[in-house]
Image (cartoon, rainbow, N blue to C red):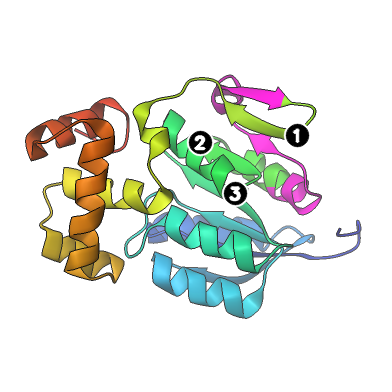
């Protein structure tokens, strides 16, 4: 665990450059935080994170490429000492569930002041949880397991993180070929995921799949 005199090394992954520039500028004014790199998509972000092994990673929920939860699984399994905070505009139960599933310690909304994020980074570096108040209200804490879980459950919790990413792409009207290209997977693999997703959700129509995704907060209408 970091001591009070250690610099907190962070990597920021978000495809909104104005936000990234604003955050980096503010972080530079804090003597406890060192930005070791930024990236604008999931693939570049993963390479940078594995190379630099930062103390804290800040990830947007919506990233081009493989997707944020897909790379978060790899970060969690390969870098045990790196803490993850999701920073997003989505207040969605399934995204909160996925964040907890990949052992993220934070889920903050982009409507929060920058000072809230700085406070969260410092808490995360100490291994403490940090959530926006509206996120906290959706969680329950298990004292025996020493971890949080989402109060409500939906059929989406039966899907893997990768299947959620595939579903989000499909719900936006992308073809199997386009999804495969975005996620760096084969078309056969995407087709297989598509079949399993529809089977698990009991949906057999692309239009209804899109409507369901909007209702569950996976995509915007």
* Magenta span contains residue 193: no
- Tag nearer the camera, 2 or 1: 1
Residue at (44% x, 38% y) in the render: 95
Q: Quadrant of the N terminus?
A: bottom right
Ranked by sequence position, the earlier of labels 3 and 1 is 3
CA distance for labels 2 and 1: 16 Å
Residue 118 in the image, given as x and y percentages of width and height: 68, 47
Q: Which is nearer the eye, 43 or 73?
A: 73
Q: Which residue is mark 2?
A: 97
CA distance for labels 3 and 1: 20 Å
Residue range of the region highlighted in magenta in the rendering? 121-141
Q: Residues within 10 Å of mark 1 (few under 14, many from 20)?
A: few
Residue 54 in the image, given as x and y percentages of width and height: 68, 68
Ranked by sequence position, the earlier of labels 3 and 2 is 3
Residue positioned most to the bottom: 51
Q: Which residue is mark 3?
A: 85
Residue at (71% x, 35% y) in the render: 147
- Tag nearer the camera, 3 or 1: 1
Q: Would you say the residues marked 2 and 1 are in contact, meaning their CB atoms lie under 8 Å apart?
A: no
Q: Which residue is mark 1?
A: 145
Residue 82 in the image, given as x and y percentages of width and height: 69, 61
Residue at (40% x, 36% y) in the render: 158
Q: Would you say the residues marked 3 and 2 are in contact, meaning their CB atoms lie under 8 Å apart?
A: no
Ranked by sequence position, the earlier of labels 2 and 1 is 2
Q: Residues within 10 Å of mark 3 (few under 14, many from 20)?
A: many
């Amino acid at each position: 665990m970091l001591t009070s005199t250690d610099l907190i090394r962070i990597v920021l992954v978000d495809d909104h450059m104005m936000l990234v520039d604003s955050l980096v500028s503010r972080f530079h004014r804090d003597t406890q935080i060192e930005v070791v790199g930024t990236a604008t998509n999931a693939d570049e972000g993963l390479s940078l994170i594995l190379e630099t092994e930062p103390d804290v990673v800040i990830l947007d929920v919506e990233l081009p490429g493989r997707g944020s939860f897909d790379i978060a699984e790899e970060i969690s399994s390969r870098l045990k000492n790196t803490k993850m905070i999701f920073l997003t505009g989505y207040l969605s139960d399934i995204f909160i569930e996925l964040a907890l599933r990949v052992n993220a310690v934070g889920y903050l909304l982009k409507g929060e002041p920058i000072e809230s994020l700085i406070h969260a980074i410092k808490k995360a570096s100490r291994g403490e949880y940090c959530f926006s108040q509206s996120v906290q209200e959706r969680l329950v804490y298990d004292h025996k397991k020493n971890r949080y879980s989402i109060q409500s459950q939906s059929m989406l919790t039966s899907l893997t993180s990768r299947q959620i990413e595939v579903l989000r792409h499909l719900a936006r009207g992308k073809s199997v070929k386009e999804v495969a290209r975005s996620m760096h997977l084969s078309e056969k693999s995407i087709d297989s995921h598509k079949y399993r997703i529809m089977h698990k959700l009991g949906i057999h129509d692309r239009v209804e799949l899109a409507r369901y995704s909007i209702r569950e907060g996976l995509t915007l209408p």
